[in-house]
Amino acid sequence: DFPQLVNQQNWAAARQQWLEARQKLWENYPIDGERAGAEIRAVWLDRGTIVQARGEAGLAKIFDQLAQAGINTVFFETVNAGYPIYPTRVAPQQNPLTQGWDPLASGVKLAHERGMELHAWLWTFATANQRHNTLVNQPTSYLGPVLTAHPDWANRDSRGRVWHERDGKAYLDPANREVRSYILRLVGEIVYNYDVDGIQLDYIRYPFQDPNRNFNFGYGTAGREQFRQLTGVDPISVSPRDSQLWQQWVNFRVEQVNTMVREVSQLLRKQYPDVIFSVAVFPHPEQD
């Protein structure tokens, strides 16, 4: 009856009904016993820590520490800078720093032995890292195994550059359907071969950008061509001053990220419904 009382502007009766409902909630609210739902006490276990463990025995010590601290969920860095840490048939190569063992298999085993969940944490669109290049004895300009094999998959800024000048990373173009297919196959390889409890997508975004400084991303081959087909305009010529076209360009890029998330979600729900799906995000403005 409450909406009807409001529509009738019968404020006194509506308020009285609200007060009665609130009182009933307080009288029936559980104040002892177990709460519904599970509490997640989690850490991101990064690639550097995994590499330093050097094997399952070293990794077991880390998991023992986490268990003693009350951690029950581990987000395990599984794909970093374009390299899976496990032996792969989908990606061009396993991370050279973990060749000779399978950290993901060890991580799943160790987590489950301690009653923990293990979620595979993936870099999604970020695919090369200059800092990582130094660790694997590659020149800083090396675009990583994925973009080296598929240079047309690169995301580019408005000046045609692949490397992000601030974070030292190179990114895949979310508008490229081959990129999204590759990421789906990578996710499929992980959930098919390993008993992971979840998949977490990191870098599920375009590189950070500043349109007011003419520092924008999204100008890969696929992104430009698809936007040109939609609007008849090459996005490289669109600026924030062109308010309507610029908003179309922003919306186009937002939808590329939405599509990637949707496709991973559909894969997991259809084939692996028990696998939890999450993303790591930043609370930044829409243009990011």
Image: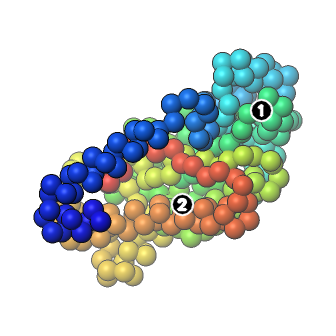
Residue 226 in the figure: left or right of residue 216: right
What is the total number of numbered labels drawn onto the structure image?
2
Q: Name the image quarter holding the N terminus.
A: bottom left
- What colour-coding does the image apply? rainbow
The Cα–Cα distance between marks 2 and 1, rounded to whole angstroms, is: 29 Å
Inspect this view and state whether residue 117 appears.
yes
First in sequence: mark 2 vs mark 1: 1
Quickly name the residue at label 1.
115
Inspect this view and state whether residue 137 appears.
no
Report the front residue among 125 and 1: 1
Numbered disc in front, either 2 or 1? 1
Quadrant of the rendered image containing residue 146? bottom right
Instruction: Provide the secondary structure element on which disc 2 rests.
Output: helix
Indicate the position of residue 250 as horizontal and vertical percent values.
32, 63
Quadrant of the rendered image containing residue 27? top left
Residue 115 in the figure: left or right of residue 168: right
Instruction: Provide the secondary structure element on which disc 1 rests.
Output: loop
Amino acid of disc 2:
Val
Dot 2 and dot 1 residues touching (CB under 8 Å): no
